[in-house]
Image: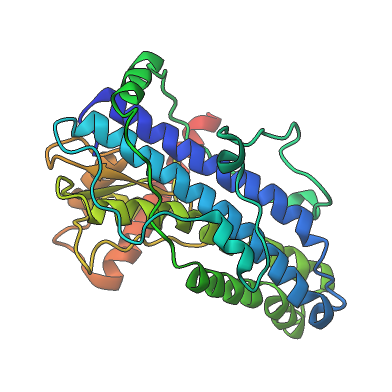
Amino acid sequence: MASTPEGRRLTERHRSAQQQVRDDFLAEFIALWALLDSTRLDDTGPGWIQAVTRVVRAFRIESAELAATYFVDFRSLEAPSSPATPRIPGGIVDLSELDSRPGGPVSPPATARTGRPPRRRQDGFQGRRPRPEVIPEPRNSSVRFEFDEDAFRRAGERRTEVRIEVPDLDTDRLDRATEVSLIVTGPVGQKSKRSRGKTLQQARDESFVESSGAATRQVLTGGRQSLLTLLDEDPQAVGWARVTDGDPCSFCAMLSSRGIVYNTETSAAFQAHDGCACTAEPAYSRGAPLPGRAAEFQRLWNEHIRGRYSGAEARRQWRRLYEQMQREAQREQIA
């Protein structure tokens, strides 16, 4: 958790950058959606899965690179007296090694090729897209900060000799997980929906939403795993806190209410559902304020759930409370 204003701003900038990776990936996913012919799922499914998996792999690396850069910048602000970087297991990701993998070569992300973030498309998408009503809207935070660019420049100057290393991700395992998700939500999902009486278009539209959500989760796994791996090897870190957008779902709001998640084997895993856009903020002090709306959610949990309910019932009561709070907020906006 950030104890400095600059650290809090850096966390929001990182969350927005990961959201941009998600949006850019979604543009590529929409273009590839035309490859999956709903009338020929057995014939077109394998090629679609392979194509999407390769794009997921490239954007996963970009997500991991952003997280590693954020970690070094955040650490220089929040723990400036500690050593520059901790030991990083697994070495550096060598993008050229991916050329020899069974899936074929992968173009490195724009940040690796040019040193600059990818240029945002004017319309936000490219290629053919499904019907407009089934395209998921990105959920951006309603919180905005005025960035102190001088502070970020000074932080960058302090780490001019630091080599940013990206923890090596288990690409084969992550690719297999991506393929399974795409099979279940894509070809198999459409067949299952058709067998339950859905029309061809209904099955295709629902499959698009489900498969795009599953694929974006696999993309952002790169940043989440990279950051948690770096934190696990950092002796100065006491844990991490979940960072949500301005209007998270009840599940993500509940997890962020827990505050610091300690770096232990049982607690360090980042729980993310399909389509989840949450990130993590390192914690170098147990007394630092929680990021975003986490303090608000923690107060709600302590006042209404803690000590009254447990297990599944606690989760049900939280969801009921949270969704009621969302409805009241919507009514106030309309009024």
Looking at the image, the residue that sits furthest to the top is 150
Looking at the image, the residue that sits furthest to the bottom is 195
Q: Residue at x 40, y 16 (%)?
A: 149
Image quadrant holding the N terminus, namely: top left
Out of 278 and 163, give the one closest to the viewer.
163
Q: Is residue 159 left or right of residue 323?
A: left
Q: Quadrant of residue 57?
A: bottom right
Out of 168 and 190, give the one closest to the viewer.
168
Q: Is residue 335 visible?
A: yes
Q: Quadrant of residue 52?
A: bottom right
Q: Is residue 288 left or right of residue 275?
A: left
**Where residue 66 sits: x, y (%)?**
46, 42
Out of 14 and 207, give the one closest to the viewer.
14
Above or below residue 7? Residue 298 is: below
Q: Is residue 246 visible?
A: no
**Where residue 169 sits: x, y (%)?**
43, 62
Q: Is residue 161 left or right of residue 79?
A: right
Q: Residue at x 25, y 49 (%)?
A: 240
Above or below residue 184? Residue 281 is: above
Q: Residue at x 81, y 53 (%)?
A: 131
Above or below residue 311? Residue 138 is: above
Q: How many marks?
A: 0
